[in-house]
Image (cartoon, rainbow, N blue to C red):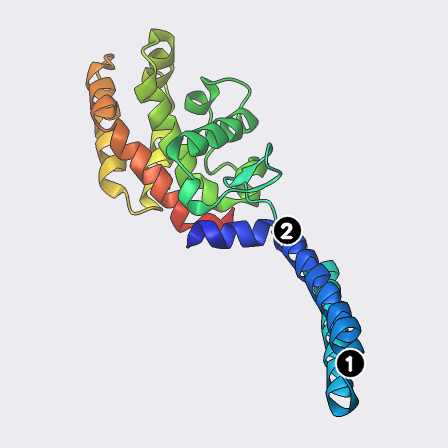
Amino acid sequence: MEKLKSFVRQNLKLILFALFGLLVVTGILVIVLGGGNSDGFLKVMFIIFGIVLELLACSVAFLAIVMGESEPANFFLYDGKKGANISLDELDFARVDKKMTFVMTNLTESVSEVWSRRVIFAQSSDVLRENEALVPLVAYKMLYDLAERANENVWGNYLSADALVIEDVAAALELNGDTELGNAFKFLFENAAGSYERTAKFLADNKRYIQSKMLKYVKANIERF
């Protein structure tokens, strides 16, 4: 049903113009064939019915022009190749992750900067100030990227992170009710003792959980994007 609704929304203008054409042709046939082959009262009725169909066709054409514009592009749903939004059912984690990678590149100049500089609640962050719904997703993305990478340089950035950055990550996760994940991440950082192995294992074990939370969050808040 959702796919059908999405198809109708994406092709509304085409559907309305097709209906316009059908009504015009039908109206002409009713007048020419029905009215031309009838006499008296029946002929008058065919002509009136044909005129009504033509007027209805004009109304449909008006709707096609005024209301037939496609829906606004949604950040997570818009498909550049299709030139339209995909349905919510088609949205998967891979698309969410790709979109969030784009967000992260606009937040910082390098991957390491998300750990050395506070970007989540920073007043200077135009991206997040314009769309606060992205805040929890940035925190999830930071954790997911750590879980995906075995590069020691990246983990070195984590170990040398500002404690306030870790606090911001936990606070952002809490906005989505994920206090337990945020507290666990904070605890591991505070007790890292110069080693990232425990945090790496924790995030690797919870990678699918993070994926699930990101996808569910986007779907639940899709109108905010």
Query: Of residues 209 and 112, which is closer to you in this image?
Result: 209
Dot 1 corresponds to which residue?
47
Q: Is residue 13 left or right of residue 160?
A: right
Question: Residue 33: which disc?
Answer: none
What secondary structure is found at the residue carrying circle 1?
Answer: helix
In the image, 59 versus 190, the foreground residue is: 59
Marked residue nearer the N-terminal end (2 or 1): 1
Report the mark closest to the observer, 2 or 1: 1
Q: Amino acid at mark 1?
A: Ile
Q: Secondary structure at mark 2?
A: loop
Number of on-image labels: 2
Is residue 5 rendered to the left or right of residue 28?
left
Residue 110 screen position, x and y as percent: 51, 17
Determine crowd level at label 2: few under 14, some 14-19, many 20+ residues with C-alpha closer than 10 A.
some
Asked if residue 213 can be seen in this view, the reply is yes
Instruction: Name the image quarter holding residue 112.
Output: top left
Instruction: Between residue 40 and residue 140, name the one nearer to us.
Output: 40
Q: Is residue 97 above or below residue 32?
A: above
Image location of residue 115, percent across then percent down: 41, 22
Q: Residues within 10 Å of mark 1 (few under 14, many from 20)?
A: many
| CA distance separating discs 2 and 1 | 36 Å
For image coordinates 45% across by 24% down, the residue present is: 114
What residue would you read off at disc 2? 70
- Do the residues bearing badges 2 and 1 touch, measured as CB atoms within 8 Å? no
- Left or right: residue 215 versus residue 204 is right
Q: Residue at x 55, y 54 (%)?
A: 8
Residue 78 location, x and y as percent?
55, 40
**In which quarter of the view is residue 144 placed?**
top left
